[in-house]
Image (cartoon, rainbow, N blue to C red):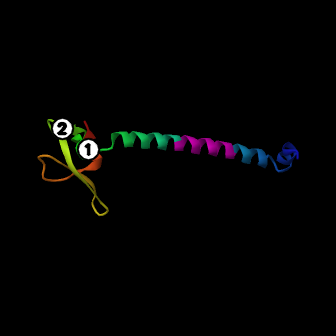
Amino acid sequence: MNLKGIGFLAGGGVVGFTAGVIYATAVLTKALEEALLEGKQEAKTAIQVGDDINWESDGMLMFPKPKQVLRIIDSEEHGKYVFVDGVDTGIPYDQCVKE
């Protein structure tokens, strides 16, 4: 089959479609690679019980020295919170910085 002839008869549709598929595949591949890299980085920096963390709020560290994580609670209703030594309230997980 002569795809060049079909592309010409269809007004370049086959060529345009093929180029679109190739472009979409490249874009999706790049997005997947970035997501995998981000996932690996998150796993590397995931906070766990026993880790030393600091609380970052509005770009400022809230503790003069890092504090040890005592427990982590993940609630569907309230989200994920970290509890540390010497602090009575939970700290939002996404505001914690692993030291």
| Sequence order check, earlier mark of 1 and 2 | 2
Report which quarter residue 52 is drawn in.
top left
Q: Tell me the residue at 26%/40% (across/down).
A: 97
Q: Tell me the residue at 65%/42% (across/down).
A: 23
Frontmost residue, 34 versus 3 = 34
Query: What is the x, y in percent for residue 57?
Result: 23, 43
Query: What is the x, y in percent for residue 94?
Result: 30, 47
Frontmost residue, 95 versus 75 = 75
Q: Is residue 24 magenta?
A: yes
Tell me the kind of residue under disc 2.
Pro
Tell me the kind of residue under disc 1.
Cys
Bounds of the magenta segment: 20-32
Are there few (<14), some (14-19), or many (20+) residues within 10 Å of tag 2?
A: some
For label 1, the residue is 96
The image's mark for residue 66 is 2
The secondary structure that dominates the magenta segment is helix
Above or below, comparing residue 88 to residue 99 in the picture:
below
Quarter of the image with the C terminus is top left
Are there few (<14), some (14-19), or many (20+) residues within 10 Å of tag 1?
A: some
Distance of mark 1 from mark 2, alpha carbons?
A: 10 Å
Tell me whether the residue at label 1 lies in contact with that at label 2, contact meaning CB atoms closer than 8 angstroms: no
